[in-house]
Image: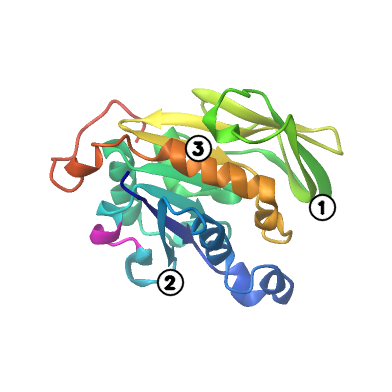
Amino acid sequence: MARINVTVWNEYRHERHNEQIAKIYPEGIHRTIADFLEKDAEFYVRTAVLDDPEHGLTDEVLASTDVLLWWGHVAHGEVRDDIVEKVRQRVLDGMGIIVLHSGHGSKIFQRLLGTNTGALKWRDDGEKERLWVIDPSHPIVSGLGEYIEVPQEEMYGERFEIPAPDELVFVSWFEGGEVFRSGCCYKRGRGKLFYFRPGHEAFPTYHLPDIQQVIVNAVGWAAPIQGAKASYGRVSPLEYNQPV
């Protein structure tokens, strides 16, 4: 079986400017995610960050990426519109994309979903989060129990201004009583999008085994079907009736 080519993208700002966050993710959130993905022999993993030339998302990188993971927070506006459009077109052509935590505010998430806000309630009190598995048959939750418990996280609460997901995998509950759609699946053109809520930079969420398992599973789910890879870079961009 051909390996899945994964690119982990991170704006990489918090970790370089905040000592506490640097202690949690000394080489960046992107490197922590890449490290556990690389333990799977089926994945070939590389990383890219905002301050790389072309944000690390050159035509060559995108053409050879099966699944792109996206983590952004404080620098959404610095992402070039032309690169956002290239990423969007690659998703429509079949590349999978996994948008993590505050990536709900990213240009690519909003372009793909047709929303210009992604608004939600939030509170950064380091509360316990329980992510309930509401579709136990879904491949993204393979190997998990009834729920994932995260000891400390930033609260995100409804109403979450997004289109209704094609598939809803997780619903979160927080100590303050709020709930949130934390695992949302969409199809866009030939590609798949998974939004996964946990991952606030101030907490070691990506070091938790269950969170890592979800991301590993999601990469497999979002990857193009075998045989589709051969057409990448050789077909004309397809137009779909999708939000712009």
Mark 2 closeness class: few <14, some 14–19, many ≥20 residues within 10 Å: some
Mark 1 closeness class: few <14, some 14–19, many ≥20 residues within 10 Å: some
Nearest-to-viewer mark from 3 and 1: 3
Which mark is drawn over residue 169?
none
Q: Amino acid at mark 3?
A: Phe
Q: Which residue is mark 3?
A: 194
Task: Work out how far the residue at label 1 is from the one at label 2, CA to CA, in angstroms.
Answer: 29 Å
Whether residue 151 is visible, yes or no, is: yes
Task: Work out how far the residue at label 3 is from the one at label 1, CA to CA, in angstroms.
Answer: 24 Å
Q: Determine whether, in the image, residue 47 is placed left or right of residue 29.
A: left
Residue 146, image x and y in percent?
A: 74, 29
Q: Nearer the viewer, residue 83 or 5?
A: 5
Quadrant of the drawing holding the C terminus: top left
Q: Which residue is mark 1?
A: 126
Q: Which residue is mark 2?
A: 51
Residue 235, image x and y in percent?
A: 14, 41
Nearest-to-viewer mark from 2 and 3: 3
Q: Nearer the viewer, residue 198 or 229?
A: 229
Q: Earlier in the sequence, mark 1 or mark 2?
A: 2
The boundaries of the magenta stretch are 57-61
Classify 26 as above or below 178: below
Judged from the image, the secondary structure of the residue bearing numbered disc 3 is strand
Residue under the image location 70 percent in, 53 percent down: 208
Q: Amino acid at mark 2?
A: Asp
Residue 78, image x and y in percent?
A: 45, 62
